[in-house]
Structures are given as C-alpha cells and as structure tokens.
Image (spheres, rainbow, N blue to C red):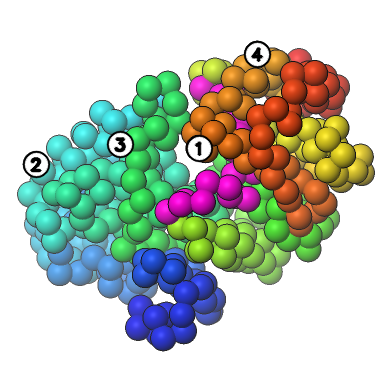
C-alpha cells in the first residue's frame, strides 16, 4: 500500500493480504509486510527496499548460522557486487548497550556506508533495537530495514517505531523513535525457534489478548501450544494469531506513536518487568518477565476490585499452560516491586498508569502511586508465590 493511498484514506491502520500500512496523525507512515520465503531469490520485497543503495547488514550469530548463506545469496543476486556486506553482532540483554550501537556505526563507516545507505537488521528484537538506534544516530539518521526472525520481533518490535539500548542500569534508557523503511515478517522463520523463544513471543501475544481482544484470549486458552507443536508455523491458527496480534498492536500504537500520552494500554506487563529483568541479571528473558508482571498485575486488579477472581485465575492459568513463569522468588520481593512502581511513576510523568485487566479483552489504568499501598502489594506478591511457576520459589 503506497503512502499516497494511506494519506488519502486518513490516519489509521490498513490491512491487506500482504500486510499492514500505518499512517499516524502526525504524518508518520510505514508498512509491515507479511511474506513467505523472504530470502527466496524470486521474492522481491527485501530487494525492493535495498536496491540502488549501499547496504550493511547485521545478523545475530544464530541467524547467521541458520540463514546466513541464504541471505548472502539473496543479496548477491539482487545487489551490485561490492555494495553490501554482512556482519554478525552479539545478542542478549547484556550486549544491548550504547557501545554496541556505536560499534554498529563504526562497522558501517568502515564499510563506506553513506547517508543514502541502508542498515539491514536480520534477527530478533535486540538486533532490531540496536541496529535501529544506530541508524537513528548515524549521519543524523539513515534508513534501516528489519527482517524479524522471532515471534517477539514479528508481533511487537517489528510493528513499532521504537529503538533503544539499555543504560544507567535501566532498560531502554537511550533510544529514538525511528520508523523502519521496511519491516518484513516471514512466519516460516519461526519454525527454527527454540520453545523458550516461542513462549516469550506468546507472552506479548497474551498481553494484547488480555487488554484488547477476548476472542484472541479464548483462542490461546484453546491452543496454548500454538507455534510450539507446529513444524511449519504457517497454519490457519498461527496466521490468525500472528495477524491479529500485529493489527491490535499497530491499532493501539497509531494515535500515540511517539508516546505524547504516557498512559498506554500496551504497557501491560511492562511496569514490574524491567526491574524483574535487571535485578535478576537478565536470568529471565524479556517475555518471561512480562509474564510475571502480567500475573502480578492481575492479582493487584483482583485485590483492588477492578477484576474478579475468575478473570485473574484465567490469566494466570493461561500463562502457566503456555509454560511461562508467573513468579520469580529472587526478584518478586516487596522492596524490589515497590521500587519498580516508583520507577514507572517517575518515568511516566509522575503518574503510575499501571495497566491492569478488568476482563479478558479489557483493561483499565491505576493512575496514582498511592492506589497500590505496600499492604496490597505484599498481598498480591503472596498470592503470586502461591501460584508458583517454573522460576518460582
């Protein structure tokens, strides 16, 4: 879908067979394509985003091992000789740093990348975040393209405009809003993901289901092993889950793309999880920390009378059936979780904006820090400990 068509239709998200186009009220427009065989020589999507420009590609070591030969063959077939290069970069939250983004820029400069060039990120969310942030800084901002190879990447990082790195003992402390020139999702790439990575992606999908879509929530209840027991990851159910999650995320982001309003439903699961990750030295993956956060937030909602016991139990049960943790003994302490609340309150303009479930498909905000007193937080944590989980006490 062209930018002109989007502009004529007005702000919003438009879905078609090939993906989604977004036009924000501020005029920002971008597209997320859904394709098969993204590295097949006769698939034009990636080439269309790169042709005629110098390209410096960055891949995770795992992606390089699994798809590096296919990627290089594709670039060799479609781009001029000497106009591109491929470079593995380290992944993991410990390597999502300002130094890593600076190294990406140094690699690009050594490769002769000019202001009309493109940085290509092929990998999961960390690769996209680091390379996207580097692209936002390099020569005051150049194009970058994402090929999202993980479930988290396809339903979350790959459909938004945020980039960033961890700094000052805080997740994503440095970053920028820098829309990708192209973002490509190929469901067949998910077939090589280990189960833990799939479950982390499912945590972000549960997030969208809880806050916005009861039908999606029920589908996950009926099929908690979606993507986990399918070799191809391209069946009707998987397509429904992927496209619904993408559409919900983009619909929610569109009117507030650069977060001028700090009260965001998509922050469900992202109030306690940054501290759970950092205080635990990233022992839990991002999606696992989000799952613990969602379970804790559900108990807080129950204790505040904002949701009923049955809804809280359904959310916690779904997370457990997927195989996600709902408690972490090392980090789910009253002191650390109170610190997480205060850090979020400070980051969100001294309003808490804690997102909690009201019912499957509906969420509300708890806006004031004093609305979650220490006594209530301790009760919620006690309930969370009783729920237990793979990483629980």
C-alpha distance separating marks 2 and 4: 47 Å
C-alpha distance separating marks 3 and 2: 15 Å
Residue 11 belongs to the span the image colors magenta: no
Q: Earlier in the sequence, mark 2 or mark 4?
A: 2
At 70% across and 64% down in the image, what residue appears?
Answer: 237
Q: Earlier in the sequence, mark 1 or mark 2?
A: 2
Residue 304: which quarter of the image? top right
Q: Which x, y percent locates residue 300? A: 78, 33
Q: Which x, y percent locates residue 28? A: 37, 66
Q: Earlier in the sequence, mark 1 or mark 4?
A: 4
User: Looking at this view, is 26 or 381 the one in front?
Assistant: 26
Q: Helix, strand, or loop for circle 2?
A: helix
Residue for badge 3: 89
Q: Which x, y percent locates residue 144? A: 28, 56
At 15% across and 69% down in the image, what residue appears?
Answer: 52
Q: Earlier in the sequence, mark 3 or mark 2?
A: 3
Residue 131: which quarter of the image? top left
The residue range painted magenta reads 258-278
C-alpha distance separating marks 1 and 2: 41 Å
C-alpha distance separating marks 1 and 3: 35 Å
Eye-nearest disc, 2 or 4: 4
Q: Residues within 10 Å of mark 2 (few under 14, many from 20)?
A: few
Q: Helix, strand, or loop for circle 1?
A: loop
Q: Helix, strand, or loop for circle 4?
A: helix
Eye-nearest disc, 1 or 4: 1
User: Looking at this view, is 131 or 210 the one in front?
Assistant: 210
């Amino acid at each position: 879908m062209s930018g002109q068509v989007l502009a004529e239709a007005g702000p919003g998200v438009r879905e078609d067979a090939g993906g989604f186009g977004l036009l924000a009220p501020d005029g920002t427009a971008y597209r997320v394509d859904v394709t098969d065989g993204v590295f097949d020589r006769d698939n034009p999507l990636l080439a269309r985003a790169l042709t005629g420009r110098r390209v410096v590609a960055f891949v995770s070591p795992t992606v390089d091992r699994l798809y590096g030969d296919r990627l290089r063959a594709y670039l060799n077939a479609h781009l001029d000789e000497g106009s591109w290069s491929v470079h593995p970069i380290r992944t993991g939250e410990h390597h999502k740093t300002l130094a890593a983004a600076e190294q990406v820029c140094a690699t690009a400069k050594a490769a002769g990348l000019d202001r009309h060039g493109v940085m290509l990120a092929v990998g999961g969310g960390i690769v996209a975040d680091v390379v996207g942030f580097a692209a936002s800084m390099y020569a005051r901002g150049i194009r970058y393209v994402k090929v999202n190879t993980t479930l988290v990447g396809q339903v979350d990082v790959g459909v938004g405009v945020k980039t960033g790195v961890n700094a000052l003992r805080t997740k994503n402390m440095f970053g920028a809003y820098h829309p990708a020139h192209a973002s490509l999702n190929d469901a067949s790439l998910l077939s090589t993901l280990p189960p833990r990575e799939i479950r982390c992606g499912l945590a972000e999908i549960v997030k969208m289901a809880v806050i916005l879509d009861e039908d999606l929530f029920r589908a996950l209840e009926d099929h908690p092993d979606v993507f986990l027991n399918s070799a191809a990851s391209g069946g009707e159910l998987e397509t429904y889950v992927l496209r619904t999650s993408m559409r919900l995320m983009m619909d929610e982001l569109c009117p507030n793309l650069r977060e001028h309003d700090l009260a965001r439903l998509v922050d469900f699961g992202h109030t306690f999880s940054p501290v759970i990750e950092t205080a635990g030295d990233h022992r839990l993956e991002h999606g696992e920390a989000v799952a613990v956060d969602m379970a804790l937030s559900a108990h807080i909602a129950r204790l505040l009378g904002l949701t009923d016991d049955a809804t809280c139990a359904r959310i916690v049960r779904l997370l457990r059936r997927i195989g996600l943790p709902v408690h972490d003994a090392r980090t789910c302490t009253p002191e650390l979780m109170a610190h997480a609340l205060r850090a979020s309150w400070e980051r969100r303009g001294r309003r808490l904006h804690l997102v909690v479930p009201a019912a499957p498909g509906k969420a509300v905000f708890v806006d004031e820090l004093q609305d979650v007193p220490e006594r209530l937080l301790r009760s919620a944590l006690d309930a969370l400990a009783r729920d237990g989980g793979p990483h629980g006490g």
